Image (cartoon, helix red, strand yellow):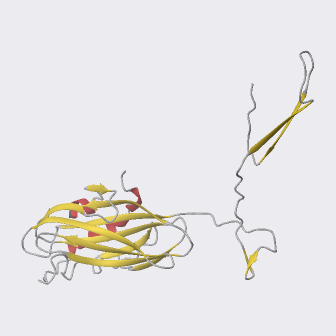
Amino acid sequence: MKNNMKKTIVGIFTFALLFIGAQSVSAANVFNGQSGDCNPGMGIGIYPNNIPRDSNGCWTASYIEANAGDVVNVAMYYRNNTKNPLTNVSGSIVQRTGSNNTYTFTGTMYSDQGSQTIGTVTLKILTNQTLTYGSTHFMKDAAAVISDTDTSIFHNDGGKMIVGTVPAGWDNYGEFLAVYKVSNNQQPQLCQDQNASNYGQPLPCVPKVVTNCSLNISANPTSIVEGQSSALSWSSNNCSNLTIYP
């Protein structure tokens, strides 16, 4: 499925990076590290209208709050920060669940030359909903990012996603964008019985589960001889439907 959910997000996020010329290299980082790189390299937002960015289009939010029905996007920017190609490169975005409907997402890049945690972002869901992973969309290089063209789409929640070789050079940056959906579960209907309470708070109504369906059949009279008739009657208990035959 084409990542329609990230349209308009990616272009602003990365287009300015081609025009940032700072070239100071930090030898401590295999990925990122130049002054023109997105810092932080991890960002989070709610699609489509709540993606905090700086003047260069880089995502800036490391914490957001979401409501039922929101689409949450988690972006991880990476670039080769060395003077040589990085080989066997892969990336992962790992989701962890905390207390009080809080989720964290940690992005990591791997290579033969070294691995690096890109960053961690946090999501707080304001109502009692569930969070469902959809897919991760990968754009391998600057051309793919700017044109919003997926190199690959993964359905691999938390696992490593293969990039391959990342050449040296300013234009050799890429992006992973993971998409999550906050459920829109209906809240339980409160009981109308004013006596149903828990320390003064209404209790949710719980549907009654009907079990042990039974059928009773009687005849009057209970015995007859050939040519006579008997009246049959029946009743059921805890049954939703019944079939009597022949």
**What residue is rendered at 29% in x and 65% in y?**
176
Q: Percent x, y for residue 149?
A: 28, 56
Residue at 28% of width from left, 81% of height from top? 39
| Residue 105 seen in the current view | yes
- Number of marks present in the image shown: 0
Left or right: 135 as drawn, with respect to 108: right
Residue located 20% across and 83% down the image: 35
Looking at the picture, how far across and down is residue 18, in whole percent? 21, 70
Q: Residue at x 70, y 51 (%)?
A: 211
Q: Which one is in front, 57 or 134?
A: 134
Q: Quadrant of the C terminus?
A: top right
In this rendering, position of residue 217 left or right of residue 124: right
Q: Which of 199 and 61 is in front in this view?
A: 199
Residue 58 shows up from this direction: no
Res. 138 image quadrant: bottom left
Question: Outermost residue, left direction?
Answer: 84
Residue 106 % position (x, y): 32, 75
218 horizontally vs 29: left or right: right
In the rendered image, residue 133, in percent from the top left (x then y), is placed at: 41, 62
Q: In this view, does 93 lie above or below 122?
A: above
- Is 222 left or right of 125, judged from the image as shown? right
Q: Residue furthest top?
A: 227
Rendered image quadrant of residue 79: bottom left
